[in-house]
Image: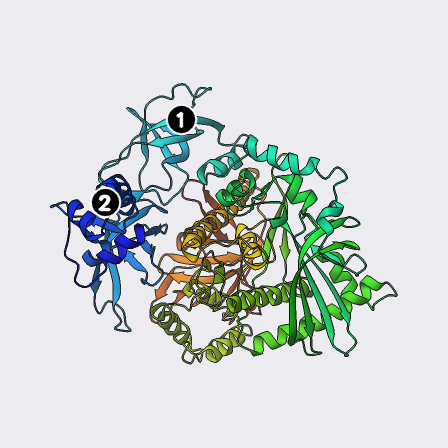
Amino acid sequence: MEQAILRLLGRRDYSPSDFNQLLSRLGLAPGDQPALQQTLRRLEQNGQIIRTKGNRYIQSLQADLIPGILRVNRQGKGFLEADDPAVPEIVVAESATGTALNGDHVLVRRDITRGLRPSGREQATGSVVRILDRKHAQIVGTLQRSRQFLFVIPDDPRIPHDIYVPPARDTGRPANIGDKVVVQLKAWESRHTNPEGEIIEVLGPADSEGVDMLSILRHYNLPAHFPKKVLNEAGAIARNHLHGQPTPDELRGRVDCRGHCVVTVDPDDAKDFDDAICLGRDARNQWKLWVHIADVSHYVRPGGALDEEALHRGNSTYLVDRVIPMLPEALSNELCSLNPAVDRLTKCVEFVLSNEGRVLEAKFYPAVIRSRRRLTYKETLAILQRPPAGDAVEQMLHQAHALAQRIRRARFQGGSLALDFPETKIRLDPRGRVLRIERNENDVSHQLIEEFMLLANEAVATRLMSLRRPALYRVHEPPDETRLAEYRDDVVSHNIPCGDLARRPEVQKLLLRLDSLPIGPALKIGFLRSLMRARYAVEPLGHYGLNKPKYTHFTSPIRRYADLVVHRALFDSVKISAQGLAPVAKRLSETERNSSDAERDSKDVKLFAYLRAQIKSGQLETYPGLVIDVRNFGFFVDVPALGMSGLVHLSSVEDDFYIFDATRNLLVGRRTRRVIRLGDNVTVQVGKVDTFKKQVDFQLTGQPPKARKKTPPPFPPSRGAKP
């Protein structure tokens, strides 16, 4: 009925109709009135249709009303991600967001403003006219008191107002000034007045152990525990496998790969192992590669409690001090995990590859394996850095490394973009304080596994498309032309040659050039910001970053529900329609973004506490930094050792008075003529930490700036594309 209504309202000859007219034009019987009313109400709540003053229904698009998710940056500017991916991004000025908050599902009235950009292109703008659904009806913040009122300062700096609250009641513990609390937001009608709310939970003093992470869990609505029915279902599965291994019945019909030299390679702190590989020469002087993926779909059946909870969570979330798994440990760490020296069920992609790494053949089948060894990336790198020993595993790893590097070179020659950035890993002490910060490079041990997983993802997508089966695809759409043109203008302003970035070879040429320039890492961040965010879709729209027209996610079903859907689509006889998968794709794109934001914030709160402790003790550490943006009030510095960026305000630079040269985008000392520009290497220490605004200010140390040299790429911004 939903599709029939939308088809009718979308017809060219459709005239706005009331309820009775719709009932007639749809050919429905009087007994269908309740179903029609319910469907119309749902479509109206979703923003797909609107009801006019005469109680007549029209499509929202006909009135230039676009439903979508509002994203708000820290400056208050909004961007609408339309529900319809074909609708370009709409900019919503701070004054036009109304009472909508970041992440809300809203209805925006679109208008077109011409000539605001140097390119002369039209820029879609709009204003929020209705909030369809609040993402965060519950707000986490810090309780404060004025002379007359109690109020809560939200943890999210994108919420523009403090929230007035009465004293907490029935929360199980008293609320004291400075406590972290959870507030239930009441109806908020006007942006010009502060919202009101009610304290529903007191988390405790902001600096108490564990409260910081509890605040993250509440803000992002991350579940701390599995529901009882989910644990019961997982427990029943575990009890049916008393020895923690598959039963003889489960092995029937599977290809037996237990005699193969299968290994897993994962981070040193990993507890769930999704993927394993085996490589060997075949009789035709070619390579045979087996990519084994945990057979989660064998245990997690559609419609069960485990399946419903996994879809609700969407993916595992990796906070700095814990993992919020998609599946209970009985499955994620045990029965599904490809642990060494035990039988495990897998879905296998078996490749025949040429010596150059070209795929000659691919087969897909259920299998059973027994992993020979659980390797970490560090162990694998050490093996690859020494001559291979007589050990079969070490010999295979050296062969796999050589083949993976040939595949990698061919991938970049074929148009894939080099967008990898190092990541930081924060290690905590038993009290949850920062012990050390590690920098994880994308070295050859990571690349070995990455190339084989990309190969499997592409092969599965190709197979699904040839079978014409509805499935989920991992899509990364080309960047918006306007953003790309603006980025090119920025590059050219630094006297760096830059061709037409709408042409992929020119993008590759530019990225290669940036890798050799001191200013390169800072400008590479700008390129990442111009890209679209990767998402899930039922249409195989291709992956811009990888330059793959056919791509999906298949290799991590323990921690991504999308991969579980793909396993079912490829191997199971029960199918689901593309129409039924569309809301699943939307849901998983949103849970992935929510987890990514939570993971970033969990790092930030630990780093803020770490830097505040430095200020309090007076023992300030110094860090090398890279200037990534220059403004008239100061310059922003990326600090790779911390995995974060911050402002060096000109008021803190005492060696001279600096003047901003807007034409050349740099700062010049009036007396010393010292120049500070994009790409400069500087040495900084923490100056100020603003917990409420979630900002860190750095200050230059007394040391002179280091000589320019190639700097490791900084921590990637959140807009970067993940494969």
Kindly tell me whether residue 216 is visible in this rendering.
yes
Q: How many dots with numbers?
A: 2
The amino acid pointed to by label 2 is Ala
* 309 lies left or right of 256: left
Q: 321 or 554, which is in the foreground? A: 554
Q: As displayed, is residue 342 above or below residue 197?
A: below
Element under label 1?
Answer: strand
Q: Which mark is residue 29?
A: 2
Q: Position of residue 499 (x, y in %)?
A: 42, 81
Mark 2 burial class by Cα count in 10 Å: few <14, some 14-19, many 20+:
few
Nearer the observer: mark 1 or 2; the answer is: 2
- Taking depth in this image into account, of 190 and 581 the one nearest to the observer is 581
Q: Nearer the viewer, residue 158 or 89?
A: 89
Q: Which residue is mark 1?
A: 200
**Residue under the point 54% across and 35% down:** 224
What is the x, y in percent for residue 278?
74, 63
Instruction: Please tell me the numbered disc located at residue 49.
Output: none
Element at badge 2? loop
Relative image position of residue 156 (x, y in whole percent): 40, 42
Q: Is residue 605 visible?
A: no
Q: Is residue 185 above or below residue 86?
A: above
Q: Mark 1 and mark 2: span between their CA atoms?
A: 47 Å
